[in-house]
Every structure is written in C-alpha cells, then in structure tokens.
Image (cartoon, helix red, strand yellow):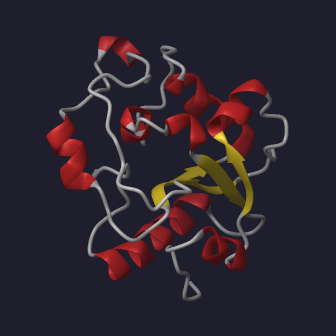
Amino acid sequence: MKNIEFKTIEDLKKAGFKGFEKVKDLKEKHSTIPETMGVYMVVRNSSDQPAFLKIGSGGFFKGEDPNVPINELKRNWVEDTCVVYIGKASSLRKRLYQYLRFGSGKNVGHKGGRYIWQLKDHDDLLFCWKTLEDKDPEQYESELIEAFRNIYGERPFANLAK
C-alpha cells in the first residue's frame, strides 16, 4: 500500500478515489456509482466539531436499534481526518445503495458504518470510491484501515472493531 494520507479530500484524490458525492444527492440518484468491485470511504468535508443526534436516521435491521449513546460516538470520533468510514464492495453501486437505504430508515442489512447516521450533518457527508480490477476488495479495505490505524492509532470513526 502506497503511503496514503487521510487528512483531506485532496489526499484521497491523490490516492485514486473518485466520486465525492453528497449523501443527499446519492439518495436521489445513485446511478453515477460504478457497478464494479472496489472500496469506498465516507468523508466529512468540515473541520468543525461534529454534532451528534440521539436518534439517527439508520434503519432497524432485524428489529435492532442502530443508535448508540452520544458518549460512545464522542469516544469513537477521530480528530484531524476527513474519513469517517472505510468499506468494501463486490458491487459498489449495490453496496452503497444498501448503505444509503439503511441511512434512510429502511430495514436493510447494512449495519456496518451505522454511526454516520447519528452525525447531524450526515446528508452532507461525501461518498468516494476506488474501483478495483485485480485486487481483492476485502484485502484492500483491511490495508486501508491498517494504514489509517498506523496514522491515528485507531480505526475510522464508524469502522467498529469486529
């Protein structure tokens, strides 16, 4: 893995990530997302301290409440980075569509990264992606998370320990 920086959107663009489309726009039209396999990131384009919602917009998959106490969100927050979540997909369009539907309160199996839906500005978050032709998305996602951890000492905000 090349030395990737996670501080700014420009850092991610230099690493080959594309898209950078707002959640609220992708909820309306997600056809711009490639159908190929790849990795994606959810990015916050603000250096302001985040505001958290007690009840977010995430769906109740299998009846399970996706919301956590605000103190837990504050403990997980990672300063000095734009990245709030790193994910993988065998089909970027299908996976991100599931993620967006979950964030719209639908009963969808995309519980990973659910903390973003308790950010007050979640509709302004950006999705970016990198298509992969000959690299395993799961392996690449692990490498990205490890590179992030090497810089920040922890996983991205919404990447929960498995």
Q: Is residue 91 visible?
A: no
On screen, residue 146 above or below 55: below
Residue 40 located left or right of residue 112: right
Which residue lies at the image location 69% right of the left edge and 57% below the top edge? Answer: 129
Q: Residue furthest right?
A: 32
Name the one closer to the observer, 39 or 123.
123
Residue 115 x/y as whole percent = 36, 39
Which residue lies at the image location 56% right of the left edge and 45% below the top edge? Answer: 125
On screen, residue 46 above or below 111: below
Residue 27 located left or right of residue 46: right
Q: Where on the picture, by quarter, is residue 30?
A: top right
Residue 120 x/y as whole percent = 42, 35
Which residue lies at the image location 54% right of the left edge and 88% below the top edge? Answer: 3
Residue 3 located left or right of residue 155: right
On screen, residue 107 above or below 112: above
Name the one closer to the observer, 105 or 141.
105
Which residue lies at the image location 31% right of the left edge and 49% below the top edge? Answer: 160
Name the one closer to the observer, 61 or 78.
78
